[in-house]
């Protein structure tokens, strides 16, 4: 999957990386400075030399409210009064952080951190916020003691008569008042600064190295996820290997695809360019078919494909020529009665053919076109098709070059089809006029008799059939042949079509010889067209 989507993965990764780098490099640098506070319980005025009882719950409660107090607007206003007037214009933020204790809860260390685009402002804001918090704590504690002093004094004033002043309560209140007055004078709060803020030398954000790593990793993960999603949604066939694996057939050959110019000129590459790479590919296919058919005599061979337009008719016509040139008596039958193509490629009439023979209107000999193949002794660049059938002779000539070329011109000879007695024989049975019921016609017993009769008089009968998944004709034709050759063009297939073709192939009664791939050659080797001389 990574190899198939490598360009997508690379593009997305680089795009995210570029975006991450741009974002990191354009962010405003931020500096951080911290001031540490220590929580310490005040000395007991009543017993300054003795052990002071520490209420852990009260201590934790007092520590836990520090972040809320530091973040309050009242404390921020007080801190700005302690800073220079121009410092606040740079902008800053202050937070308080509590540290966990090993025994559970929070430790007695509180860190006040200030963040600002200016390193000087960050340090000043941290110290000012810490000092404002200490002042607030001291003032709050002093106010609590002052309120207690006022309450005690009020009680003492209420005891005006001499009898009340001699009571123990009055004496106790006087003692408490003196202690509160001493506490009011010495109150200082529970926190002290142990580490003042220092001016930071480098910004902590943005971390450019970390930003690059995060952008690269995030882009790669995003690209992989996108590739995985597209892989699930993509139904294209990726490469020849996937075709062979899905079909479960061995590859017998690779045929180069025809360009539009070549198709318009002539799809019969075995004739118009016998020394070219396409003709060589068909000769390799012919040899591989001989090996694939070892052990079983194949007299009738069906050629089909998954969908229309993959090139099965072109393969059937060229393979028939290649087999005939090898000295075999070959009969080519156009069994695609819906959209016949064989007559177009050979340039023969289609008024009579399989449809008229099976329907009983014509005999096989009347519909059959006999074509002779021989090699031209002169460098005349032309194709001549001589066909005999129904008592008439048809001569059709297609000239690709000058018919008056000089005999001594240094040009390699080309193939010419003539009607000579010494020529190699190739018989063609066109499809004939399209019938209204082609599916029933190819499944009829008369069609099977036609194939058997042709096989008795030929070394090999090649049938060009409709696409396997389009209609059911190929399934019916499979019962009349000995073997099947499958043609596949990966560029024109989708995975569901290929999987459906495999399912239907497994149900066919004939032998499956292998698959022929329509694929651009990766090199023609020594015997390429350029090296033919």
Image: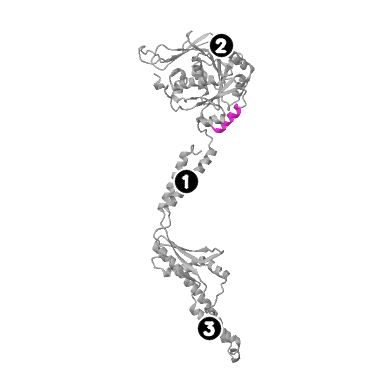
Q: Which of marks 2 and 1 is nearer the N terminus?
A: 1
Residue 186, compared with residue 278, is above or below; it is: below
- In terms of secondary structure, where does tag 2 sit? helix
Residue 41: give x, y in percent of width and height.
52, 73
**Which quadrant of the figure has residue 277?**
top left
Label 1: which residue? 219
Residue topped by disc 3: 178
Q: What stretch is highlighted in magenta?
A: 494-505
Between label 1 and label 3, give the one nearer the viewer.
3
Number of numbered tags placed on the structure image: 3
Please say whether residue 437 is visible from this viewpoint.
no
> Percent position (x, y) of residue 283?
48, 19
Q: Quadrant of the C terminus?
A: top left
Q: Name the residue under label 2.
A: 366
Mark nearer the N terminus (2 vs 3)? 3
The quarter holding residue 355 reads: top right
Pick the residue in front: 260 or 246. Answer: 246
Q: Residues within 10 Å of mark 2 (few under 14, many from 20)?
A: some
Structural distance between the alpha carbons of marks 2 and 1: 70 Å
Q: Gap in Å between the C-alphas at discs 2 and 3?
A: 138 Å
Horizontal arrangement in the rendering, residue 243 relative to residue 404 (left or right): right
Please state if 286 lies on the left or on the right of 199 as rendered. Answer: right
Of tags 2 and 3, which is closer to the observer? 3
Question: Around disc 3, counting alpha carbons within 10 Å, would you say few (fewer than 14), some (14 to 19), or many (20 or more)?
Answer: few
Element type at mark 3 = helix
């Amino acid at each position: 999957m990574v190899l198939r989507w490598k360009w997508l993965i690379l593009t997305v990764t680089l795009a995210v990386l570029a975006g991450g780098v741009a974002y990191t490099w354009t962010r405003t640098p931020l500096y951080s400075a911290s001031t540490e506070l220590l929580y310490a319980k005040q000395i007991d005025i009543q017993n300054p030399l003795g052990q002071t009882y520490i209420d852990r719950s009260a201590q934790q409660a007092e520590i836990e409210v520090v972040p809320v107090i530091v973040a309050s607007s009242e404390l921020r206003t007080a801190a700005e009064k302690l800073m220079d007037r121009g410092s606040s214009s740079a902008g800053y933020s202050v937070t308080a952080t509590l540290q966990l204790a090993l025994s559970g809860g929070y430790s007695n260390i509180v860190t006040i951190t200030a963040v600002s685009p200016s390193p000087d402002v960050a340090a000043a804001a941290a110290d000012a916020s810490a000092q404002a918090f200490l002042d607030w704590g001291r003032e709050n504690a002093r106010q609590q003691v002052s309120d207690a002093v006022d309450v005690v004094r009020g009680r003492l004033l209420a005891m005006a008569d001499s009898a009340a002043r001699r009571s123990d309560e009055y004496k106790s209140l006087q003692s408490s008042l003196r202690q509160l007055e001493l506490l009011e004078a010495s109150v200082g709060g529970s926190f002290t600064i142990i580490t003042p803020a220092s001016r930071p030398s480098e910004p902590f954000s943005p971390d450019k190295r970390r930003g690059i790593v995060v952008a690269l990793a995030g882009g790669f993960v995003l690209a992989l996820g996108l590739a995985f999603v597209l892989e699930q949604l993509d139904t294209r066939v990726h490469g020849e290997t996937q075709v062979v694996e899905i079909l479960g057939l061995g590859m017998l050959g690779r045929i180069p695809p025809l360009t539009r110019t070549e198709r318009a000129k002539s799809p019969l590459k075995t004739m118009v360019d016998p020394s070219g790479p396409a003709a060589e590919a068909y000769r390799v296919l012919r040899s591989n078919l001989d090996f694939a058919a070892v052990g079983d005599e194949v007299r009738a061979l069906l050629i089909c494909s998954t969908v229309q337009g993959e090139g099965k008719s072109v393969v059937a016509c060229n393979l028939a020529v290649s087999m005939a040139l090898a000295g075999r008596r070959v009969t080519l039958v156009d069994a695609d009665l819906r959209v016949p193509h064989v007559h177009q490629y050979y340039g023969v009439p289609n008024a009579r053919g399989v449809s008229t023979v099976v329907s009983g209107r014509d005999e096989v000999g009347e519909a059959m076109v006999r074509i002779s193949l021989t090699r031209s002794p002169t460098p005349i660049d032309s194709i001549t098709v001589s066909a005999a059938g129904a008592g008439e002779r048809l001569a059709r000539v297609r000239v690709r070059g000058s018919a008056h070329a000089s005999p001594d011109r240094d040009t390699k000879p080309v193939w010419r089809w003539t009607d000579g007695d010494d020529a190699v024989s190739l018989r063609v049975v066109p499809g004939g006029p399209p019938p209204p019921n082609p599916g029933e016609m190819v499944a009829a017993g008369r069609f099977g008799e036609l194939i058997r009769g042709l096989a008795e008089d030929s070394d090999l009968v090649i049938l060009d059939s409709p696409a396997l998944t389009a209609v059911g004709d190929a399934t019916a034709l499979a019962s009349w042949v000995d073997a099947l050759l499958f043609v596949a063009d990966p560029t024109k297939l989708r995975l569901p079509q290929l999987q459906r073709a495999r399912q239907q192939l497994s149900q066919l009664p004939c032998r499956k010889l292998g698959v022929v791939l329509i694929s651009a050659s990766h090199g023609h080797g020594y015997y390429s067209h350029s090296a033919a001389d």
